[in-house]
Image (cartoon, rainbow, N blue to C red):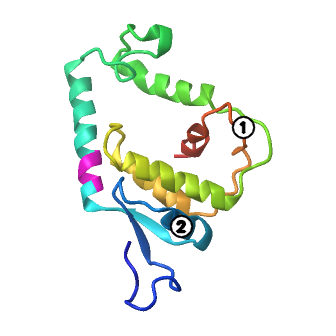
Amino acid sequence: MIYPSSQDKRKQKPDVVLLDGNSLTLNDVETVALRFASASLSESARLKITDSRKRVESILHEGKLVYGITTGFGSFKEIYIPSEDRLKLQKNILLSHAAGVGEPFKQSHVRGMLLLRANALAKGFSGVRLEVVQDCLISSMRVCTRSFLRRDQSVPVVIWLLLPI
């Protein structure tokens, strides 16, 4: 975490919470979610994300059969998805899981969840594009008032979080 000065850190709001995928603390989450600090990716996280994405791009270029990258999901795990249909598949899988009921989450909860998702992606294991993680961080800094973000433990919350991105 980067602080604006060397004064008492407990009383100051940091300028930026730096995400590396490994050292995020509960205090950091609280600082971003409740005190509106911003967050950014460390250089090492950027490199890990970029390297992971390059591996996915290589798989796509070589046409290898890899679950969820060049194939369908579940019972369609052995069905090769042609490159021209992959974007449509990704969109449809997100939309098929984006339903829920209940009261909207509080803004602070949404900010915290976006930060946690960005931190998990910062580990560099997912193959996600760097721009998606950066958009997560940008979205967490904005005022989140989307009414579609609902509480429902049975539906993956991350789908709701990433739909606008």
Three-letter residue code for mark 1: Asp
Secondary structure mostly seen in magenta is helix
Where's the N terminus, which quadrant? bottom left
Answer above or below: position of 24 versus 128: below
Answer above or below: position of 121 versus 81: below
Residue 32, numbered circle: 2
Where is residue 28? Give x, y as percent. 48, 66
> Residue at the location (40% across, 81% down)?
3
- In front here: 28 or 40? 28
Neighbours of disc 2 within 10 Å: few (<14), some (14-19), many (20+): many
Where is residue 7? Give x, y as percent. 42, 92
Are the residues at dot 2 and dot 1 in contact (C-beta closer than 8 Å)? no
Answer above or below: position of 152 versus 84: below
- In front here: 44 or 87? 44
Three-letter residue code for mark 2: Val
**Seen from this angle, which residue lies furthest right?**
102
> Residue at the location (36% across, 53% down)?
21
Where is residue 30? Give x, y as percent. 56, 66
Neighbours of disc 1 within 10 Å: few (<14), some (14-19), many (20+): some
> Residue at the location (24% across, 25% down)?
59
Magenta span: 45-49
Q: Which residue is mark 1?
A: 152
